[in-house]
């Protein structure tokens, strides 16, 4: 499947919408993103509906629980199922989070940050290279939100992420909302932060909503995307100078499919606007 099929703003495939999406043709969504953990090894009607959509429409895959920065051995049975799933969907890459999600084989049901140390970077680079060698498609790693650092850092978040991406020679799933949320919580300029990063490694972007709880901003994926985050997406696309697929995430307080499609269209217009300006500049 050609990578250039994946442009525009896609949606995450969520259980409440499976029935509607499976029966829709010409829905206007350029691609869906799905979490293999929710499909591999599953069964029943929801599984059949999901597979029908994944067999019909362009799909990107995004993992939740691989714990790339952790120490638990890989789940061999899951990896075998994942390989088959990636080949079946025809995804051009597979993404995981730059974090750890398990300890002693216990799933923590959360994305925990890694310490920003040279030792953690070396370990994560080694793990990412191991995982890449097991996958039939290129691996992307996604930057996460975090709310407290672990121990005494050797570097800041930007330098840590860049070191892992470059050292492991993997692509970047850039979550612009995560950058924005971390910028609010830790007091930095998100555009200056992004200017320091290896944007040539960006293959995909995520965009989502968040919520303030007092002085803390939390990446909830449970609200509409605010204008400053959309503007940050546009600024980043202009810096890239090329189209990459953008995924609108919604995992909590999931609205009706019609409402989600309307928000997708709003973000698509912003996406198209910046790409039109970029193309005009190159003309």
Image: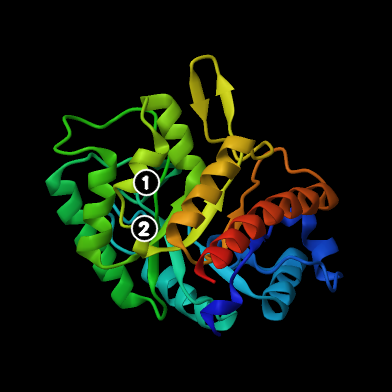
Mark before the other along the chain sequence, 1 or 2: 1
In the rendered image, the quadrant that contains the C terminus is bottom right
Query: Do residues under tags 1 and 2 come within 8 Å of each other at their CB atoms?
Result: yes
Residue 45 in the image: above or below residue 118: below
Q: Position of residue 21 (x, y in %)?
A: 80, 65
Dot 1, crowdedness within 10 Å: few (<14), some or many (≥20)? Answer: some
Q: Position of residue 42 (x, y in %)?
A: 62, 66
Q: Position of residue 225 (x, y in %)?
A: 64, 40
Q: Secondary structure at mark 2?
A: helix
- On the question of residue 160 being in view, the answer is yes
Residue at x 32% of width, y 56% of height: 68
Q: Residue furthest top?
A: 214
Dot 2, crowdedness within 10 Å: few (<14), some or many (≥20)? Answer: some
Spatial separation of the CA atoms under disc 1 and disc 2: 8 Å
Q: Which residue is mark 1?
A: 194
Q: Nearer the viewer, residue 262 or 118?
A: 262
- For residue 276, what is the image quadrant? bottom right
Q: Which residue is mark 2?
A: 199
């Amino acid at each position: 499947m050609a990578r250039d099929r994946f442009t525009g703003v896609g949606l995450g495939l969520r259980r409440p919408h499976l029935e509607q999406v499976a029966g829709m043709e010409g829905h206007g969504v350029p691609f869906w993103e799905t979490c293999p953990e929710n499909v591999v090894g599953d069964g029943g009607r929801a599984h059949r509906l999901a597979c029908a959509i994944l067999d019909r429409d362009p799909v990107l895959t995004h993992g939740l629980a691989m714990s790339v920065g952790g120490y638990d051995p890989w789940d061999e049975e899951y990896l075998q199922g994942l390989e088959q799933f990636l080949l079946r969907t025809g995804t051009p890459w597979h993404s995981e989070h730059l974090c750890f999600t398990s300890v002693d084989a216990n799933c923590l049901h959360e994305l925990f940050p890694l310490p920003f140390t040279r030792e953690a970077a070396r370990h994560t680079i080694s793990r990412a290279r191991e995982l890449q060698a097991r996958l039939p498609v290129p691996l992307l790693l996604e930057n996460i939100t975090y709310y407290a650092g672990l121990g005494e850092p050797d570097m800041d978040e930007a330098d840590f992420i860049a070191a892992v991406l470059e050292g492991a020679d993997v692509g970047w799933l850039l979550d612009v909302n995560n950058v924005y949320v971390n910028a609010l919580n830790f007091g930095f300029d998100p555009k200056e932060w992004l200017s320091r990063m290896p944007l040539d490694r960006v293959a995909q972007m995520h965009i989502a909503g968040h919520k303030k709880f007092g002085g803390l901003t939390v990446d909830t994926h449970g609200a509409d995307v605010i204008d400053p985050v959309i503007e940050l997406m546009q600024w980043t696309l202009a810096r890239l100078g090329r189209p990459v697929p953008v995924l609108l995430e919604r995992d909590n307080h999931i609205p009706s499919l019609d409402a989600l499609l309307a928000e997708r269209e709003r973000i698509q217009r912003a996406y198209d606007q910046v790409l039109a300006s970029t193309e005009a500049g190159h003309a």
